[in-house]
Amino acid sequence: MSSAPNPNLAALTAAGVSVWLDDLDRTRITSGQLSRMIEVDSVRGVTTNPSIFDKAISEGADAYAEQLTALARAGADVDDIIRALTTDDVRAACDLFLPLFEESGHDDGRVSIEVDPRLAHETHATIDQAKDLWALVARPNALIKIPATPEGLPAITEVIGSGISVNVTLIFSVERYRAVVEAYEAGLALAQSRGHDIATIRSVASFFISRIDTEVDARLRSLGSPEALDLLGQAALATGHLVWEAHLESLASPAWGALAVAGARAQRPLWASTGVKDPSMAPTRYVYELVVDDCVNTMPEATLRAVADDGPVPEDTVTGTQQQARSIWSRLEALGVSRQEVSETLESEGVQKFIASWEQLRSTVAAAAGS
């Protein structure tokens, strides 16, 4: 079997998009599959969430059985078992990515693990668990996932301020993205004041792309007018393009300039939830329409395979799109589709979906442990 890099995924990487896999399980690690994806599919990082771990444990029961049984016999409760299983997987994946981590100047080769989503509205508990997870994984290329809720923002600042790298999740609007950037910059300043080397800290801001189209398109179909139907499938990319504009503006600010001189690295926008939900859309839509230098795209494997089999890969589909993006949102607002209302709905639903996934994971582990 060829070990040459897939040309489409290599081209995407050359265009400045870091390809991360939105999936992880123990069999991928132990079988060598993840190593092969690093080599052949240009995979430069991994993101995880409760649903991914639930699928991994329920479908890969044999891979986890011995450890799970030992933990249960030792008296570990469900949450302790989840923490042990998931942090072991993340630690092992971090080790696989360590050469890429070093080669990329510590930007890539990153593996994300999530704070318990039940803490999404609890600042101090989020801070405590983020620090615990960082210490438990004990790898410099880990990222701790913290949601961009109002309560999550000060937690992001404190965790960054403790020298810990963070993947900020559940971002649905430009306005909240700007608040995330401010939280990151405040965290870097705090870290600097505490004597941390801010050049070692990294962060990505995960923008959940496809969920915006799902929510907005449902509203447009409900309206049913020609004007509404003409805007189907456009809200998510328009918002992503405006996020990129906000990113560039933040890098031009005096506040960022001072941090950059001290060695700080920019918080990269990360396009998440890039698997299409509407079967009428091309499976590569949320990849090819978000190509721009120095971003991350984390893909479920089906999306990654669609890119691998498609082509050619565009070089830049974001620069110069912002005027059109603003026009799209002006038209949406004129139809009564409120950007603020959409983002608030998606954030609330996002937290609840993550909590539901976490509880499903707990049920899966409890059943496997016989408790």
Image: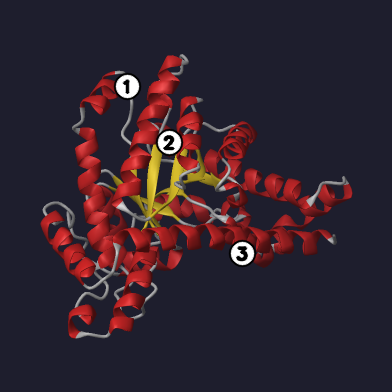
| Kind of residue at badge 1 | Gly
* Residue picked out by circle 2: 101
Q: Between disc 2 and disc 1, whose residue precedes?
A: 2
Of badges 3 and 2, nearer the viewer stands: 3
Which part of the image, by quadrant, shows the N terminus?
bottom left
Q: Between disc 3 and disc 1, whose residue precedes?
A: 3
* Residue picked out by circle 3: 55
Residue 359 position, x and y percent, is 67, 60
* Residue picked out by circle 1: 263
Residue 101 position, x and y percent, is 43, 36
Tell me if I can see residue 113 in this picture: yes
Q: State the SS at label 2.
A: helix
Q: State the SS at label 1.
A: loop
Query: In the figure, 273 relative to 267: above or below?
Result: below
Q: State the SS at label 3.
A: helix
Q: Nearer the viewer, residue 342 or 144?
A: 342
The residue at 36%/62% (across/down) is 341
Residue 238 position, x and y percent, is 22, 61
Local crowd size for mark 1, using a 10 Å CA cut-off: few (<14), some (14–19), many (≥20): some
Q: CA distance from mark 3 to mark 2?
A: 27 Å
Query: In the figure, 285 relative to 145: above or below?
Result: below
Which part of the image, by quadrant, shows the C terminus?
bottom right
Choose top left, top right, bottom left or bottom right for residue 62.
bottom right
Residue 140 position, x and y percent, is 51, 31
Q: CA distance from mark 3 to mark 1?
A: 39 Å
The residue at 36%/56% (across/down) is 172
| Kind of residue at badge 3 | Lys
Of badges 2 and 1, nearer the viewer stands: 1
Tell me if I can see residue 1 in this picture: no
Give the left or right position of residue 22, taking residue 173 as reference.
Answer: right
